[in-house]
Amino acid sequence: MTDFELRQGVLHCEDVPLPAIADAVGTPVYVYSTATVQRRAREFKMAVAALENPLVAFAVKANPNAAILAILAGEGFGADVVSGGEYRRARAAGVKASKIVFSGVGKTADEMAGALEGGLFQFNVESRDEAEMLSSVAVSMGRRAPISFRINPDVAAGTHAKISTGSAQDKFGINAAEAVAAFNRASKLPGIEAQGVAIHIGSQLTSLEPLELAFSRLGELIDQLRRAGHQISVADLGGGLGISYDATKPAPPSPASYGALVERVAQRWGVQLLFEPGRLIVGDAGVLLTEVIRLKNGANHPFVIVDAAMNDLMRPTLYEAWHEIEAVTPRGDRMVADIVGPVCESGDTFARARQSDRVEAGDLMVIRTAGAYAATMGSSYNSRPLAAEVLVNGSDWTVVRERQDVEALIRGDIIPTWIKPV
Ligand code: LLP
C-alpha cells in the first residue's frame, strides 16, 4: 500500500492533490507522506519486537530533514549519524542523545568531542587508530567513550558496487581476524569502553543470504571475543534491507522476514541488538514532483524534458538506479520516451526508452520512491537552487524546507579585492 495514489484521475499524497502543492510551491519539489514514514517505522518496530530491548537508530543520511527526524523521534527511533552535522541535526530535531550511534570511517577529533559533549549511545569505531584518537579526546575531556568496533565480515552484499561496504577490499571496519587484538588494545585505553561489535554490509540488499552470512560470522566472533575475556553486550546489525523501486521485479524480503532471520540467528547472543535502517523507513515515503518543460524529437523516441535534474536526484546517474515515473493527471495513453533534466550532461537522464504516460509541456510528473538518498544528495550544480521539500499529513501539508534562493548562491561567493571591477 502506498500513500501516493490516483483519486479521480489526479495523483494525491494522502488527501492532498499534488497539483495544489506544485501551484503553491513551484517545482521541482519533494513531497513526503507522514503516514508512510509512520507505517514503515511501525512495521520495522514490529519486525524486531520479539527481541529484548532493540534500539532502532534511523540512518540520518537517508533523509536528514528535521521534520522526518522529528516524526521518527516520536516513534521512539534513535539516529545513526556519520558526521558532526548529522549529530547536531538529529539532536536539534529531538532525537535523544542516549539513542545516537556515531558511525563513519573518518571521524575527526572535533566530531568526537562534539558528540561526547552532547552524549550518545556509542561510537562505531572503524580502526585501531581511530580508537586511540577517540581515547585521547575522551581523556582530555575527562570522559570515557562507549564504543563498538565495526567489523568487516568480508561478505559480498550482492548490491551495486558503489553501495557495497562489507567486502575485505572495502574501506569499512576492521578485519575479523584483527578483532581480538583490537579489543585487547582497547581494554588498555583509558578513554574508551568497548562494549560491542557492529556491521553494515551494504545498502539496497534484495536477498537475506548475505545478511545471514554476515550475522553468523558476527555471532562466531562474539563467542571468540568472550573466550578471550571481553564483555560483549551490544551488537549493531546495521541497515541495508532493500525496497521495491520497480513493481515488475520481485519484491525484496519483508521487514518481518528480516526480523525472523535476526531472531533465528542473533536472539541467543545475549546482547542488546541495534539496527540502522534508512531507505526502508523513508524510501517510498517521498516523490519528486516535477513539471514537463517541453518535448523534443530524438533519434528513436522523444525526449521529455522535465524541470527536475540530476542535481536534484542523483541516483539514476550515479547508480543507474531505476525510479518509477508517471504523470500526475494521466491522459490514459502511453508513449516511449527518454525522460531527462535540463542539466548540460547526457548523464542527466532519469529514464531511457521508458514506457510512460503520454505527457505534454506543462504537465506534472512524479519520480517515485524518492524519500531516501534523494533530496539529501542534491547539489546546486548548474546553479540550480536546491529543491523545496513538503510534508503532507492527511489533508494538511507544509513546506519543511524552503526552496534555496539563487541570491544565496550569489551572496555566498566572494570576489577578492585584487580583482578590479570592470
Ligand atoms: N548504517 C551505515 C553504517 C550505513 O553506511 C548506511 C548506509 C546505513 C546504515 C543505512 O543503510 P540503508 O538501510 O539505508 O540501506 N546513496 C546510496 C545509498 C548509500 C548508503 C550508505 N550507507 C543510494 O542512493 O542508493
Image (tube, rainbow, N blue to C red):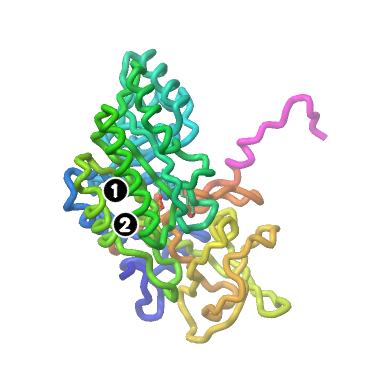
**What number is the disc on residue 72?**
1
> Which of 60 and 198 lies nearest the eye of the viewer?
198
The residue where tag 2 is placed is 37
Q: Residue at x 56, y 72 (%)?
A: 362
Q: Is residue 112 left or right of residue 417?
A: left
Compared with 300, 206 (above or below) is above
Q: Is mark 2 within 8 Å of ligand 1?
A: no
Res. 281 image quadrant: bottom left
Compared with 6, 53 (above or below) is above
Res. 30 image quadrant: bottom left
Q: From the image, give the main secondary structure of the stretch colored magenta.
A: loop
- The range drawn in magenta is 408-422
Is the residue marked by circle 1 packed among few (<14), some (14-19), or many (20+) residues within 10 Å? many
- Say whether residue 157 is magenta: no
Q: Residue at x 64, y 72 (%)?
A: 294
Q: CA distance from mark 1 to mark 2?
A: 8 Å
Is the residue marked by circle 2 packed among few (<14), some (14-19), or many (20+) residues within 10 Å? many
> Which of 413 and 285 lies nearest the eye of the viewer?
285
Callout 1 touching callout 2 (CB < 8 Å): yes
Earlier-in-chain disc, 1 versus 2? 2
